[in-house]
Image: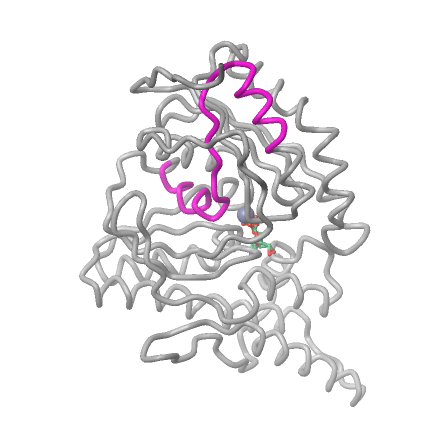
């Protein structure tokens, strides 16, 4: 019979991630990361200019066993050493999620260890534990990924209130769409950052930060359209534009409000720490803006390493550990979910 688990203080947890184009496995003991492995289908997806769900599912099917073997081998462990299996169950591409989830269920069931279904977004927020295992709420969380953009007030380990989120596109989505407009390859964010290095922020684009219902929100769709119009208008007039200046100006417009608003929220709520996570937090300009604003305002900033900002399984294992400590185990009928509200 599956169940009846003996819990431990420092459990060995396997984390699995397959929500988009990275198949990843990582192992933690308590909060300590032992190993983190990724097999990515990004190069394959780049040929199509973005992630093709069916190709992602097939790539996960090919890679999930291998990436888990690599993790166990680099940890010098076998499956018998695992005390729990944590896996992303959403949000993400349904077929892609099902590959990781089915694999995790089978493994947890056969080993009779807890299965922990992890919300991918909470995983991004937990990546900060890889930088500082001792972080304690309350703090402000800046979340900026391909699917989500929000500033949250993390009050306890399990409870984060959204202070303001995006009402249309996410920041990463805007990076990807602007990249395509500028003729840059997928994945767009990192290529915009590269191009922006040789440009100047000399074009005025609208701010994505808006006032809403007495609070604030982000709207990246307007910014994206403004860049699109700028490029198309220039093309129609036969004018040469400096693509590096466009990339740099867009990057400033997209990123500055995120850093500034996170700091404003911390000051308003009297919170001394800011934590950040999600693919866009790998952006060097955002990281340096956050650092200098936090320094100037005497706030502590916890940034995950760049490789733990984009999708990985170490963050899933870390969030798995939080849920393990609270006894939040999943039953075998847990299903994958394409969307989970923040
Ligand atoms: O968190 P993530 O890996 O996947 C989601 O959960 O969505 O985020 C991916 C997003 C993509 O939109 C990508 O363009 C963006 O993060 N991104 C970046 C950078 N690296 C990844 N955006 C700006 N600058 C970067 N260096
Ligand atoms: Zn992600």
Residue 263 x %, y %: 30, 64
Magenta: main secondary structure: helix
- Of the 4 image quadrants, the one containing the C terminus is bottom left
> Residue 84, located in which quarter of the rendered image?
top left
Viewer-nearest residue: 255 or 339: 339
Who is closer to the viewer here, 27 or 121?
121
Going 47% across and 16% down the picture, which residue do you hit? 82
Instruction: Give the magenta part as a residue range.
Output: 101-129
What residue is shown at x 51% (from left), y 16% (from top)? 75
Residue 295 placed where, x, y %? 27, 57
Horizontally, residue 212 falls left or right of residue 108, namely left
Q: Is residue 286 above or below residue 182?
A: above
Is 32 one of the magenta-colored residues? no
- Which of the 4 image quarters holds residue 72? top right
Between 187 and 332, the residue placed more toward the observer is: 332
Residue 132 position (above or below residue 93): above
As drawn, the residue found furthest toward the front would be 1
Q: Nearer the viewer, residue 267 or 119?
A: 119
107 in the magenta segment:
yes
Q: Residue furthest left?
A: 270
The image's colour scheme reads one colour
Look at 38% across and 17% down and name the residue there.
5
> Residue 225: x, y in percent?
63, 78
Left or right for 301, reference 92: left
Compared with 83, 178 (above or below) is below
Hey, which quadrant is residue 79 in on the image?
top right
In the picture, measured across the screen, residue 296 lies left or right of residue 146, that is left
Query: What residue is at 56 percent from the left and 15 percent from the top?
Result: 110
Percent of width and height locating residue 236:
80, 87
């Amino acid at each position: 019979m599956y169940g009846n688990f003996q819990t431990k203080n420092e459990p060995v947890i396997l984390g699995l991630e397959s929500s988009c184009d990275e198949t990843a496995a990582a192992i933690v003991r308590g909060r300590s990361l032992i190993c983190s492995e990724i097999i990515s289908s990004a190069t394959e997806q780049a040929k199509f200019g973005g992630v093709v769900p069916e190709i992602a599912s097939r790539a996960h099917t090919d890679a999930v066993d291998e990436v888990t073997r690599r993790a166990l081998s680099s940890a010098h462990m076998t499956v018998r050493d695992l005390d729990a299996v944590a896996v992303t169950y959403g949000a993400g591409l349904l077929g892609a999620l099902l590959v990781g989830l089915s694999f995790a269920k089978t493994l947890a069931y056969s080993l009779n260890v807890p299965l922990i279904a992890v919300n991918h977004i909470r995983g991004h927020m937990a990546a900060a534990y890889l930088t500082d295992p001792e972080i304690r709420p309350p703090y402000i969380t800046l979340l900026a990924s391909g699917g989500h953009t929000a500033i949250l007030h993390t009050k306890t380990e399990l409870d984060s209130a959204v202070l303001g989120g995006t009402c249309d596109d996410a920041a990463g989505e805007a990076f990807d769409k602007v990249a395509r407009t500028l003729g840059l390859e997928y994945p767009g964010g990192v290529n915009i950052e590269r191009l922006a290095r040789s440009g100047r922020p000399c074009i005025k684009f609208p701010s994505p930060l808006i006032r809403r219902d007495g609070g604030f929100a982000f709207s990246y769709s307007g910014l994206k359209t403004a860049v699109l119009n700028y490029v198309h208008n220039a093309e129609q007039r036969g004018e040469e534009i400096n693509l590096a200046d466009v990339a740099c100006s867009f990057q400033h417009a997209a990123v500055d409000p995120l850093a500034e608003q996170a700091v404003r929220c911390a000051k308003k709520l009297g919170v001394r720490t800011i934590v950040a996570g999600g693919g866009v937090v790998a952006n060097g300009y955002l990281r340096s803006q956050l650092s200098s604003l936090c320094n100037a305002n005497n706030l502590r900033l916890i940034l995950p390493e760049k490789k733990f900002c984009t999708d990985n399984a170490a963050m899933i294992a870390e969030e798995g550990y939080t849920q393990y400590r609270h006894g939040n185990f999943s039953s075998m009928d847990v299903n994958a979910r394409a969307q989970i509200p923040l």
